[in-house]
């Protein structure tokens, strides 16, 4: 019985060590998967942030354009000048929309 006891202790320690290594490997794999998921989400959020910055810049430009157009319209002396200002505004807006559509492709 005394010879068998150290062998049983060694087997028990070996099984414990194997189970600890198994749990560590499984945890490591789960963490790698979570890191990939979080990295993908981070990239998506970076794209969203970039789009928000672009949108904010475009809105500020549109606001400036709006004030400029209002100033030009109030200074216009004829209906033809007003029509020209409005046509220019429509053309600029159409170009902006086309540019945004081509960037999304």
Image: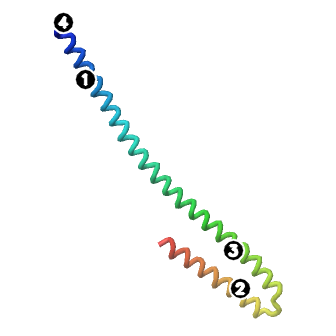
Q: Position of residue 91 (x, y in %)?
A: 63, 85
Cα distance, mark 1 to mark 3? 71 Å
In the rendered image, the vertical position of residue 23 relative to residue 74, given as above or below: above
Cα distance, mark 4 to mark 1? 19 Å
Q: Which residue is mark 4?
A: 2
Q: Which residue is mark 2?
A: 86
Q: Position of residue 80 (x, y in %)?
A: 75, 94
Secondary structure under tag 2 reads helix
Tell me the mark number nearer the camera, choosing from 2 and 4: 4
In the rendered image, the vertical position of residue 86 relative to residue 56, given as above or below: below
Q: Position of residue 99 (x, y in %)?
A: 55, 77
* Residue at horizontal 37 percent and vertical 36 percent from the top: 27
Cα distance, mark 3 to mark 2? 14 Å
Residue 14 is labelled as 1
* Residue at horizontal 35 percent and vertical 33 percent from the top: 24
Name the side, left or right, on which 69 lies relative to 45: right
Name the side, left or right, on which 41 lies relative to 66: left
Q: Are marks 4 and 1 in contact (CB under 8 Å)?
A: no
* Residue at horizontal 21 percent and vertical 14 percent from the top: 8
In the rendered image, the vertical position of residue 4 relative to residue 64, given as above or below: above
Mark 1 or mark 3: which comes first in sequence? 1
Mark 4 or mark 1: which comes first in sequence? 4
- Quadrant into which the N terminus falls: top left
Q: Are marks 3 and 4 in contact (CB under 8 Å)?
A: no
Q: Which residue is mark 3?
A: 62
Q: Nearer the viewer, residue 2 or 20?
A: 2
Q: Position of residue 23 (x, y in %)?
A: 34, 32
């Amino acid at each position: 019985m005394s010879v068998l006891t150290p062998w049983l202790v060694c087997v028990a320690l070996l099984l414990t060590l194997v189970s600890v290594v198994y749990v560590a490997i499984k945890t490591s794999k789960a963490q790698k998967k979570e890191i990939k998921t979080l990295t993908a989400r981070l990239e998506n959020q970076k794209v969203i942030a970039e789009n928000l910055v672009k949108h904010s810049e475009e809105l500020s430009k549109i606001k400036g354009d709006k004030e400029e157009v209002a100033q030009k319209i109030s200074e216009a002396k004829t209906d033809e000048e007003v029509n020209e200002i409005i046509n220019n505004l429509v053309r600029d807006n159409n170009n902006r929309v086309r540019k945004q559509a081509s960037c999304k492709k």
